[in-house]
Every structure is written in C-alpha cells, then in structure tokens.
Image (cartoon, grey):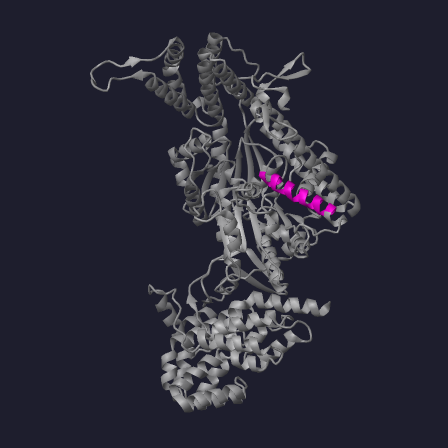
C-alpha cells in the first residue's frame, strides 16, 4: 500500500511540473541509467529525441516512465537516473519528498539567468574557450565526467563554437548553476563575459544561492546589462515570441502571465499556481512574492486540486457515484476535469474503453466548460469536443461520440439520441457507450426534467442488471455518475423531514452512494470562498402614486365594459395569470370583445409592474408604444394613392380601448415627469450603488431583476443619470436567449461579448435576469443586488455566490409591502434546513440510506410508467383512430377506435359498415 502511495506521488509530481521537466531533462544520459525500461520503450524515446528534438524526447521519456513497471523501486530508479545523468534540477522537481523543490523565487531567478545566457548567447559562443571553462565547471562540481566527455567530443569534432553551445545547453539544466558559472568564467580569464552576464553587481547570483542582500535588490537587478537588454526587448513588437534555442536551452517569454485564482494550490509548504493562459515560461525581474508566483508559468496548465477539492473528489476517484456539493466559485468544474482525467487514465492503463460525457442545462455552458476547463487540461491526451443545439455539425451525434473521448453537451442532445436508439430506422447512442457521465447543476435532476429522463433509463438498466445477475447472464455495462451542484435545495419543504426526503430523492435520481460536502478542510474552503456582508434595503411604498391610480381607473373601465371580474389585485402576478386565462378562453369561444379587452388589460398590468419596479416614464412608454402599434395595425392606406385618407379597420371594441387610452394619455405623460412621485425603490438602489462603487478601487457588481424589460429599463435609467458615470459605473444588461418576451433576446455571442467586457473591466455593472444566477463564468463581484427579485433558496445561494470578492456585499432592495423581505427570510431558513438535511443524510447508516434510495428509485420509475399511461389515454381520447383492432387469427386490421361506439356506458359496438362478424 505504501509503495502504491509513493508511486502515485511520483506520478503527481510529474503531472505538476511536466512542462519544466521537458525543458530540463537530457534524454540520452537518463535513458542509459534506466535498465528496467524495455528495449522497445528505450528505442521509442531515442527515436523521438533524434527526429523531433530533445523536448519531444523528454515527453516520450516521461510517458514511458508513467507506463513503466510499477513497484520494485521503479520510480526511485528514475530519480537516481536524473541525479546521476546530469539532470539534478529535474530530480528536484520529481522528488516527492518536496525537500528540494525550487521555490517560486528560485524558479524566477533560474529563468532570468537562462534568459540572460540566451541574450548573450552569440557573444559567449564566440569568445569562450570551451574546454577551459568545462574543466573548471567539473572541478567545481557543476558538471559530471559525462558532461565533460560530451563537450570534449563535440569540441574536437565540430570546433570550439559548437563545443560552447553544448556547454551552455548542459549548464542550464543544473541546480544553482549561475553563480558557480560566473566564478568559472572569471577563473579562466573570461572576466569580461562574467561582467556582461552579471553587471558586476552580483545581485542575481547572490539571490540564487539564497543570500540576503541589504541593498535594494530591484535596483541591483536593473543595473545589470542583461536586465537592460530584457527591458529593451519589452519595447519590441515581438516581445512574446520565444528565442531560438538551437542548443536546447530553456525557452522563455517576457511579460506577466494571467493566473487563475481558482487554481492556486498548496503542496507542502510551497505554493504552486496553475495558469489560465498558455503563455510559456516567464522570466521576471521583480522580487515581490506575487510576481514570483506569476512566474511559474508553464506552456500548459497543471491540473492540481486543493485539499478541500480532493476531499470531495476521493469517492469519485475510487469509481463511486456521488454528488459533489460545493459553493459557487470554489472550483466544482476543476474537480470534474480532474476526475475525468483520472478516470480516462485508469481506463487506458487497464486497456478498457473509456468515454466521458459532460451534461449541461444551458447552451453557453458548453463553450465555457470546453474553453476554460476541459480543453486546456485534457487536449494533450484526449479528444475533447463541445456540442449544443447551436453547433453546426456535419456528422451525427453517435459519430461524434465514437470519435471523441470527452463530449460536453446539452442534455437534450443526449436525450434525443437515446430516443433515436429505441427506433429501428434511426442511429442513436446507449448509456453503455459512456464510462462516466457528469451532470452539471444536478439539482435539476427531478420530476420531468431532461436530466431525470436520462437517469430513469439508467435506473431501469440497473434494475434489469439485478435480474440478469440472478439469472447468471451478462450485465449491461453502466457508466459512473458524477453530479455537481452548489445547492440541491429543499424542494419547497417546510419541515426537516421533508427537506431530508428531497435530498434523498435527488441522491436516488442520480444513484449516488453519497453526497459530498467539505468537512475536514472547511477552513480552507472558507478562505477561498468569501462570505459577503448581507444587508436588506427597504423602500417605503406608502407614498401617493397618482400614476398608478390613473392606470387602475382605466383598467376598471375596461373590466366594466367587457364584464370581466377578477379576484386578484391590479399589478400582481395572480392578476396576470387570470387575464391570460381569460384571453385564451375568449379566443377558444370566439368572443372577440372579451379577448381583445383581456389583451389590453394585460398591457396595463405590465405597466403597473414596470411602475412598481422602475420609472413611471418606462411604464408610460410601454403603453404608448403598444397603442401606436395597435393604431397602425388597425389603419390601412392605399398602395396607389398616398393622398387618399387612411381607412380604419377598428370595430367598436378597438375604438373604445384606443379612445380610453388617448383620453388619459396627456395626464399620464405629465405625471411620469414629476420626480416627487418617482419610485422609492430606485432611490434606494441609486444610494446603494453610489455607496458600493465609491468604497472600492475596482468595483464590480450585478443587479438581478425579474424581467428582460426591467433589465433593459434599469440599464437605460443608469445611462440617463450622469451621477453614475461620475463614480465610474459602466453598465450593460445581460438577458436570456429565448424568444419568450417582447424584448429582443440576446444571442449567445452577444452574451459572451458582454461577459468578456465584464471580465476585462470595460463593463463593471451587469443588470441581469436569472440567466446570470447559475453556471455562467462571471468574474467575482464586490456587490450583488437582488432588486425586488426573490425566488427560491437555490437561486439565492447561486446569486449570493457571485459576491465572492474580498469585502463584498449582497443586498436585497425591496419595497416594504412587496413580501420580498419575508420570502428572503424563508429562503435563508430553507438554506439552513438544506445543510442540516444534507448532514442528516450523510450520517445515516449505509443500509438505511441504500434502502431509502432504492424505494425512491422504484417510486420514480412507477410514477413515470403511470404518467406514460395517462398520456397515452389522453392521446387515444383525442384521436381514437390510433387504437387498432386486429383479427386474433390472421392479424388482419378489422377496425379502429373511431369505429367503436359505447352504448349505455357498457357495450362497445363497431359501427363500421363493412365490419362483418364472420371475419373475426
């Protein structure tokens, strides 16, 4: 067991520092010291180094080591081969004890020294007496005999210049090489070269050997000739291009690298940063810890988990079905990527087929997961693709599945293909085609959701397998299931027992052995995901509202005109639902007067809701635009003669409704301009924004609002108010892509563009509908405001999770009589109830847990079957011809359901004319 653990640590270190290892390993000397490596593997590595270069050879060697014979000191043999093969720096990175792992400062200094050698490469090659310097390096312990022999051979065969190139390419692979190299140069009468490299200050060489300098180190470094060259290069257009490395010297690029805060991780006492962007290894001259952390760039990001992430991932790494419950911003997707790679690696080592599908519930999440997480970390080893309804593919989904290792897809695409598989003439996929299914935002796996439809198939196959096992028949292969969520919710529960039942049902639907939350490393999670300061801002709505009064007067007149009598208050959602029902009923019964009046009442109700949320002028414009359009639709002009008067197509109802609005129009317009009647909620929102955007240097915020119309109107309100611009607010709206609103939806590209602007700082305030609550990769905020919008505890947790910057604020702005504050209190209570229910489920005895899960799974399948029968009955009632009657002897069609009549509620008689009893 200890040996297995040690092997895993070696593999872990290789995966962490692979990009650097590839740059500092010299293949042939190491290969010569690996007798346990097979001749076939040895030849493969040697060929890669000869044909594609030293770096590719090192990559092939690392792969061979990963595939190599485990146990029996295999990794120790590799470590010794590095140390004795002249690759001492590589040995420091691979050693799992971490005792010799270079610190970020040491790495930065090493990179700078290598870069200086590159900048002065031609001078060193031209002026250095190779063998004198090489022999001095051997005496000082920098080189080994093998290094000297190789440099001697190259110098004898190809001359001093090539010998110098060989020397430089070897020395940069050594640990703490720079200071001894300068001494070797000076002691062999190459003082000028040493001065060129060091600037005669010794700043860099001293720092590399861990010596503390009392003088300002930044000043020392900038005084070096090498540093001046670096600074000059920064001004050039090609500053990001790597220098040519004909000798295999480490490639480097200038400039800072972007660090993903989510992927910082601690290994022992040393910190390692994973990087979001593929920017190569960086050289830095800054002595600050932050800059030195950034310098640990690597050509490809390293896949490492924090302790709390590893804690929740462990059961999945052992092949169990689990739900991972981690708050927004804690790196759930990174955990999923790690589990995916581990799963596919194990399948590959076992020579078993491995295929992963990642299911999401929103189209933008496909590209987000592909671009930000799965592709950067997996593209080296596996084929990764993203698919959604927007994807333009010329091949079928089953073919995509066959060609790729990891598929990121909207759940409906998989559901459609599973349905196709059930049809004889269609090509589809089976769940058994996958070895791991990852379900993002898995709290949606309930009721008739698409996630649950997919999982019901899984549960049916699981039950079928039980039966097959009893009959000693081959089982249907089933994928591992991994669910991800920030909050499973309580499903509207009002008691702890019902909340527990909801959690158990989610676990049952996902066939989860357990639901994982962070326990052991909770303090680390708390440091990573900051809890925002919460506040509630109440707007006093006792002010007089004459604008609302005029609207309700108009609505009362319309109701009296068409004799409609609602039981709900004006301006409420129940009123809106009632008026929509009345409109549909009237349309069905072909009562035009009631239908048209109901349509207009809905517009006035919308105006009341806008008035309660935003400005009076927005409500007025909503009505005015509607009646302009109505008048235009009801007026016809002749195509031939523009001078001919327009002909009205209005009937009595149209004339009444249009005249009623125009009679009040002037009064409404005047009221909309009076600031004393303005919405108090807007005043409170303005005060909150001004306060939050003036207390932070780089503020960033989101306002969540209920409708697209209110999102757009709030954006317009901020644009129209110069005070917001003065405090640096740059706002934009972010709304959904569906076509179920009067406001034009945003395309996926438009959404992405706004989010990118928000991430870069060109926009620092998003006004969003619930589209931004869940899943989308939006930069952490200082302020999150729910503007009169209160839904459920899941949405509350998701929205609050956006406020994860330091000293952030989560605020609810609502009017006192809206009930929003009370609903928020209920959500806070439900959130506490949810965490308590999760703990109770986690502490439940395993046997009891599994019994309950099994019962809920059976219940879910039975409910689906009963629903299918009800739906079938409804279909047959609507269209009896779908029911067919066949002869029991010859199976010939005799009649259909529409030929059957029921007499006295008991006798079913065929009334088909050519129906003959003798044929049956």
Q: Is residue 218 left or right of residue 30?
A: left
User: Residue placed at 69% from the left, 54% from the top?
Assistant: 315
Q: Is residue 434 placed above or below 684 in the rendered structure?
A: below
- Which quadrant would residue 899 be assigned to in this image? top right
Q: Is residue 260 visible?
A: yes
Q: Nearer the viewer, residue 546 or 629?
A: 629
Q: Is residue 630 placed above or below 288 in the rendered structure?
A: above
Q: Nearer the viewer, residue 389 or 574?
A: 389
Residue 334 locus on image (x, y percent): 57, 54
Residue 241 locus on image (x, y percent): 38, 66
Q: In what quadrant of the picture does the N terminus appear?
A: bottom right
- Which quadrant would residue 256 be assigned to in this image? bottom left
Return the residue found at the far front.
918
Residue 364 locus on image (x, y percent): 48, 44
Q: Is residue 346 placed above or below 742 in the rendered structure?
A: below
User: Residue placed at 75% from the left, 35% from the top?
Assistant: 497
Q: Is residue 280 magenta?
A: no
Q: Is residue 673 visible?
A: no
Q: Is residue 36 placed above or below 326 in the rendered structure?
A: below
Q: Which residues are magenta?
A: 450-467
Chief secondary structure of the magenta portion: helix
Q: Nearer the viewer, residue 32 or 621?
A: 32
Residue 771 locus on image (x, y percent): 50, 38
Q: Nearer the viewer, residue 523 or 379?
A: 379
């Amino acid at each position: 067991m200890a040996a297995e653990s040690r092997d895993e640590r070696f593999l872990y270190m290789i995966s962490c520092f692979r990009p650097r290892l590839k740059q500092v390993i010299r293949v042939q000397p190491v290969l010569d010291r690996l007798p346990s490596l097979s001749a076939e593997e040895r030849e493969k590595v040697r060929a890669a180094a000869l044909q594609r270069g030293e770096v590719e050879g090192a990559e092939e060697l690392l792969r061979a080591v990963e595939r190599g014979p485990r146990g029996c000191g295999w990794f120790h043999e590799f470590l010794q081969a590095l140390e004795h093969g002249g690759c001492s720096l590589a040995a420091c990175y691979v050693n799992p004890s971490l005792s010799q792992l270079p610190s970020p400062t040491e790495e930065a200094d090493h990179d700078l020294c290598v870069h200086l050698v590159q900048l002065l490469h031609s001078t060193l090659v031209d002026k250095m007496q190779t063998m004198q310097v090489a022999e001095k390096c051997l005496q000082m312990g920098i080189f080994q005999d093998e290094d000297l022999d190789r440099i001697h051979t190259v110098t004898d065969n190809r001359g001093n210049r090539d010998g110098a190139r060989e020397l430089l390419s070897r020395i940069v692979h050594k640990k703490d090489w720079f200071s001894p190299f300068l001494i070797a140069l000076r002691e062999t009468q190459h003082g000028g070269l040493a001065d060129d490299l060091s600037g005669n200050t010794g700043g860099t060489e001293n720092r590399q050997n861990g010596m503390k300098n009392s003088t300002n180190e930044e000043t020392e470094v900038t005084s070096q000739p090498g540093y001046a060259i670096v600074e000059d290069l920064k001004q050039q257009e090609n500053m990001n291009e790597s220098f040519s490395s004909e000798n295999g010297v480490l490639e480097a690029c200038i400039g800072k690298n972007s660090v993903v805060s989510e992927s910082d991780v601690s290994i022992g006492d040393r910190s390692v940063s994973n990087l979001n962007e593929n920017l190569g290894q960086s050289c830095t001259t800054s002595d600050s810890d932050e800059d030195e952390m950034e310098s640990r760039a690597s050509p490809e990001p390293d896949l490492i988990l924090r302790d709390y992430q590893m804690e929740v991932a462990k059961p999945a790494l052992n092949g169990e079905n689990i739900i991972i419950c981690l708050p927004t911003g804690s790196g759930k997707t990174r955990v999923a990527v790690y589990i995916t790679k581990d799963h596919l690696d194990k399948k590959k080592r076992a020579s078993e087929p491995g295929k992963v599908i990642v299911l999401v519930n929103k189209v933008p999440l496909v590209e987000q997961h592909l671009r930000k997480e799965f592709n950067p970390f997996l593209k080296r080893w596996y084929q990764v693709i993203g698919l959604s309804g927007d994807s333009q593919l010329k091949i079928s989904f089953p073919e995509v599945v066959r060609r790729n290792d990891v598929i990121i897809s909207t759940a409906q695409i998989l559901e459609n293909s599973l349905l196709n598989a059930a049809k004889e003439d269609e090509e589809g996929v089976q769940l058994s085609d996958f070895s791991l299914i990852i379900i993002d935002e898995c709290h949606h796996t309930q009721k008739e959701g698409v996630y649950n439809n997919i999982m019901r198939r899984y549960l049916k196959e699981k039950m079928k397998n039980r039966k097959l096992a009893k009959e000693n028949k081959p089982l249907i292969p089933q994928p591992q299931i991994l669910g991800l969520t920030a909050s499973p919710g309580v499903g509207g529960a009002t008691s702890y027992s019902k909340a527990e039942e909801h959690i158990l049902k989610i676990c049952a639907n996902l066939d989860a052995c357990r639901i994982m939350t962070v326990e052991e490393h909770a303090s680390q999670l708390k440091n990573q995901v900051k809890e925002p300061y919460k506040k509630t801002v109440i707007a006093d709505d006792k002010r007089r509202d004459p604008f609302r009064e005029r609207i309700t007067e108009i609505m009362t007149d319309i109701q009296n005109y068409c004799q409609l009598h609602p039981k709900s208050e004006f301006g409420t959602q129940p009123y809106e639902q009632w008026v929509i029902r009345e409109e549909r009923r009237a349309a069905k019964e072909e009562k035009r007067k009631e239908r048209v009046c109901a349509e207009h009442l809905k517009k006035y109700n919308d105006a009341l809701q806008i008035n309660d949320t935003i400005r009076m002028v927005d409500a007025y414009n909503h009505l005015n635009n509607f009646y302009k359009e109505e008048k235009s639709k009801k007026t016809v002009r002749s195509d031939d003669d523009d001078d001919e008067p327009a002909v009205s197509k209005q009937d009595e109802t149209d004339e009444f409704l249009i005249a009623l609005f125009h009679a009040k129009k002037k009064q409404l317009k005047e009221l909309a301009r009076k600031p004393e009647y303005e919405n108090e909620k807007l005043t409170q929102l303005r005060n909150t924004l001004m306060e939050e955007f003036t207390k932070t240097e780089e503020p960033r915020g989101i306002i969540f609002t209920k409708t697209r119309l209110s999102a757009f109107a709030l954006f317009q309100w901020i644009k129209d108010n110069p005070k917001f611009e003065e405090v640096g607010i740059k706002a934009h709206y972010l709304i959904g892509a569906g076509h179920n609103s009067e406001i034009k939806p945003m395309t996926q590209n438009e959404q992405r563009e706004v989010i990118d602007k928000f991430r870069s700082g060109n926009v620092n305030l998003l006004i969003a509908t619930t589209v931004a609550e869940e899943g989308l990769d939006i930069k952490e905020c200082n302020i999150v405001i729910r503007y009169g919008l209160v839904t459920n505890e899941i949405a509350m947790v998701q929205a609050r999770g956006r406020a994860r910057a330091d000293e952030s604020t989560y605020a609810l702005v609502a009017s006192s009589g809206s009930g929003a504050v009370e609903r928020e209190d209920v959500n806070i209570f439900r959130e506490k109830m949810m965490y308590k229910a999760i703990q109770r489920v986690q502490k439940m005895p395993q046997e009891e847990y599994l019994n309950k899960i099994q019962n809920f799974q059976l219940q879910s399948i039975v409910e689906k079957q009963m629903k299918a029968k009800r739906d079938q009955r409804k279909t047959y009632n609507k269209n009896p011809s779908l029911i067919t009657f066949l002869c029991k002897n010859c199976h010939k069609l005799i009649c259909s359901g529409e030929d059957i009549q029921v007499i006295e509620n008991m006798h079913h008689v065929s009334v088909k004319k050519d129906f003959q009893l003798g044929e049956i």
